[in-house]
Amino acid sequence: MLGALVEQLRESFYITNARGEVVDANPAFLAMLGVRTMEDLRSYSLSDMIADPKRRMEELDILDASGFVRDFEIEIVRPDGAVRTVLDSSYSCTDPETGEVFYHGILVDITDRKRQEDALREQSVRDPLTGCYNRRYLEQIEPELESAESPFGCIFIDIDHFKQYNDQHGHAMGDTTLVRMSRFLMRQVRAEEPVIRLGGDEFLLVLNPADEDAVEMVARRLQLAAIRTAPVPFSLGWSARRPGESVQETVNRADQNLLSVRVLERSVKRSPAPPE
């Protein structure tokens, strides 16, 4: 009766020996790995299928210490190269006759759930209009930026006279301008350097790692590129983190630099042109 239940359940049951070799498994386990029979599985070790060997060692340490593990999340690489995220619950037992150790376990495939969670998480840190990151993302990376040994830099961007432009051309045209501005900024930095929309017409570029000279070089390059390809005039300010400074303090200094530049250059700046 119990054997029939294991055969019919959609959860993946398995038994491995201490070497990681799968000595028995139900059809659901074979299907999850994309193989038809146990013979197809003979040449594979469960340990070899773990995407991160360190995770497998962590799991084995828990098994050795407590005799069981529950809902241990790991990624398994199938023979065809596909990666599945699973929760492993297993326990160790010793054959009383041979003294050999075996691990009995069950794998629950959570790949689709993880993808949905990742998609929701990504949406939560993205600005829906421009596709840029938002303030929540900046809050998430603050601990990493503040604990890093090397300084990070930031460039604060503010579109000139945007409220006036919105009033004159309407919010739909204003939204189009924000989208075009975000695309312009994304083209000026590397893929791993986030463009963050702080709100309204304010954007922030985060350069990590970067000292004052490196940040200034990017800012100057941005100014030159703006002459040819920026959709609207804008002001910018930049700064690099000082020792002991919080992320917000670094951003504020960039914002303060922006304000002083705007005052000096206000007389030579033209009103924003409508988007192309």
Image (cartoon, rainbow, N blue to C red):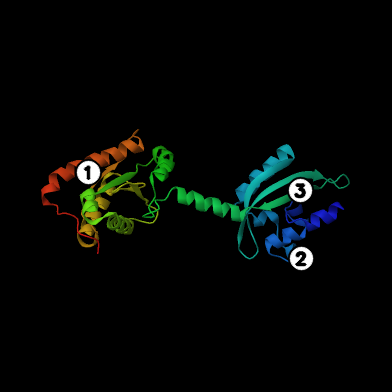
Q: Which residue is mark 3?
A: 103
User: Is residue 175 in sight in this rendering?
Assistant: yes
Q: Which residue is mark 2?
A: 37
Q: Position of residue 29 (x, y in %)?
A: 73, 58
Query: Is the residue under label 3 in contact with that under label 2 (CB below 8 Å)?
Result: no
Give the side of residue 254 with respect to residue 261, left or right. right
Q: Residues within 10 Å of mark 3 (few under 14, many from 20)?
A: many
Describe the element under mark 2 as helix, strand or loop: loop
Position of residue 248 relative to residue 121, above or below, is: above
Describe the element under mark 1 as helix, strand or loop: helix
Q: Which mark is residue 258?
A: 1
Q: Which label's residue is closer to the chain start, 1 or 3?
A: 3
Residue at the (71%, 46%) spot, across then down? 89
The quarter of the picture where the C terminus appears is bottom left
Position of residue 137 relative to residue 187, above or below, is: above
Q: CA distance from mark 2 to mark 3?
A: 20 Å
Q: CA distance from mark 1 to mark 2?
A: 66 Å
Query: Is the residue under label 3 in contact with that under label 1 (CB below 8 Å)?
Result: no
Q: Which label's residue is closer to the chain start, 1 or 2?
A: 2
Work out whether residue 188 or residue 159 is closer to the camera in this orientation and state it. 159
**Foreground label between 2 and 3:** 2
Q: Amino acid at mark 3?
A: Tyr
User: Is residue 160 in sight in this rendering?
Assistant: no
Q: Residues within 10 Å of mark 2 (few under 14, many from 20)?
A: few
What is the tally of numbered marks visible in this picture? 3
Task: Looking at this view, name the residue that lies furthest to the right.
Answer: 97
Q: Which mark is residue 114?
A: none
Q: Amino acid at mark 2?
A: Thr
Work out whether residue 139 or residue 174 is closer to the camera in this orientation and state it. 174
**Foreground label between 1 and 3:** 1
Q: Amino acid at mark 1?
A: Leu
Q: Which label's residue is closer to the chain start, 2 or 3?
A: 2
